[in-house]
């Protein structure tokens, strides 16, 4: 079963969440960065920008997942989010190191590059939400990075890319190992939907929508070669 068809029963929290961001997801799929991945036309410099900023992002995303683990009420979810935090760091150290090698750069050199505006804004919102909010707030904020990447990877996997570098990136997020992780988080989300108050549910939708917008902005920043204006 694919991540796209998991747990989205009518009336479920995941159905409500995805309905809230359907227009945002459509814009993500239509973005020239994503189109360039699949047809191989994406400029390498745009991909380099993405990889370096993603390395910065994943370090803070791992911290956010660790906070989710600390706030999780059940032992199984504590372990799952702790494992995901470790996995996020492993991705930063492993997969990105391979990509950076193509550009003749080391992880240390990439880490020395500045964290750019969209990355800073996204991670600041993410960390403020997971530290300051409830477990449900935290899950709502971290979920788009799981779910949107799974859907994009699944969507692009059938097309792949004539560029081996981009094909490798697509395979990472489209393969079954990552999809199964996302299914687990979606199942947790629907369990939460049965337990939380209407006010908490509204906050989850708000956080989920906000960080979904940041996902679009993250790819757009790479496409625009975003930098600090001053």
Image (cartoon, rainbow, N blue to C red):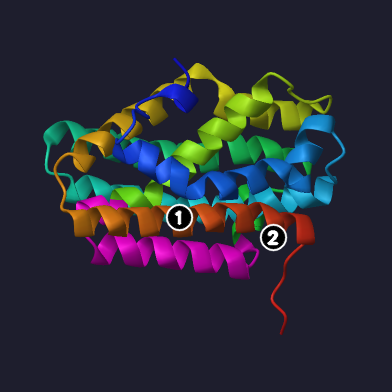
Mark 1 or mark 2, whichever is nearer to me: 1
In front of the other: 170 or 100 = 170
Q: Quadrant of the N terminus?
A: top left
Q: Is residue 123 magenta?
A: yes
Name the residue at the front extreme.
Answer: 10
Name the residue beneath numbered marker 2.
Answer: 221
Tell me if I can see residue 108 in this picture. Answer: no
Q: Is residue 100 left or right of residue 7?
A: right
Q: Residue at x 77, y 62 (%)?
A: 225
The vertical placement of 11 against 71, above or below, is: above
In front of the other: 17 or 141 = 17
Task: Say which element carries label 2.
Answer: helix
Q: Residue at x 30, y 40 (%)?
A: 13
In front of the other: 174 or 169 = 174
- Expressed as whole percent of the image width and height from the top left, the position of residue 12 reads 29, 35
Q: Is residue 82 left or right of residue 125?
A: left
In front of the other: 81 or 188 = 188
The vertical placement of 141 against 80, above or below, is: below
Q: Is residue 97 magenta?
A: no
Q: Main secondary structure of the magenta part?
A: helix
Span shown in magenta: 112-138
**Residue 170 location, quadrant:** top right
Name the residue beneath numbered marker 1.
Answer: 209
In terms of sequence position, does the residue under pointer 1 or pointer 2 come before the other? Answer: 1
Find out whether the residues at labels 1 and 2 contact each other: C-beta distance under 8 Å: no
The vertical placement of 14 against 46, above or below, is: above
Q: Is residue 87 left or right of residue 28?
A: left
- Expressed as whole percent of the image width and height from the top left, the position of residue 20 reads 45, 49
Tell me if I can see residue 85 in this picture. Answer: yes
């Amino acid at each position: 079963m694919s991540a796209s068809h998991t747990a989205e029963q009518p009336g479920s929290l995941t159905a409500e969440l995805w309905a809230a961001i359907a227009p945002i997801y459509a814009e993500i799929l239509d973005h020239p960065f994503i189109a360039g991945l699949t047809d191989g036309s994406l400029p390498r410099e745009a991909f380099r920008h993405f990889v370096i900023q993603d390395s910065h992002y994943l370090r803070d995303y791992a911290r956010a997942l660790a906070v989710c683990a600390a706030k999780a009420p059940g032992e199984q979810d504590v372990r799952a989010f702790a494992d995901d935090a470790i996995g996020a760091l492993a991705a930063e150290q492993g997969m990105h190191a391979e990509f950076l090698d193509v550009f003749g750069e080391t992880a240390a050199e990439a880490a020395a590059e500045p964290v750019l505006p969209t990355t800073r804004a996204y991670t600041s919102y993410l960390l403020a939400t997971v530290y300051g909010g409830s477990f449900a707030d935290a899950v709502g904020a971290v979920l788009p990075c799981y779910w949107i990447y799974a859907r994009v990877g699944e969507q692009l996997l059938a097309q792949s890319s004539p560029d081996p570098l981009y094909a490798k990136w697509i395979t990472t997020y489209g393969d079954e190992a990552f999809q199964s992780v996302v299914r687990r988080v979606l199942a947790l989300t629907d369990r939460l939907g049965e337990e939380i108050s209407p006010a908490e549910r509204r906050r989850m939708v708000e956080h989920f929508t906000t960080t979904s917008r940041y996902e679009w902005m993250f790819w757009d920043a790479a496409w625009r070669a975003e930098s600090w204006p001053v």
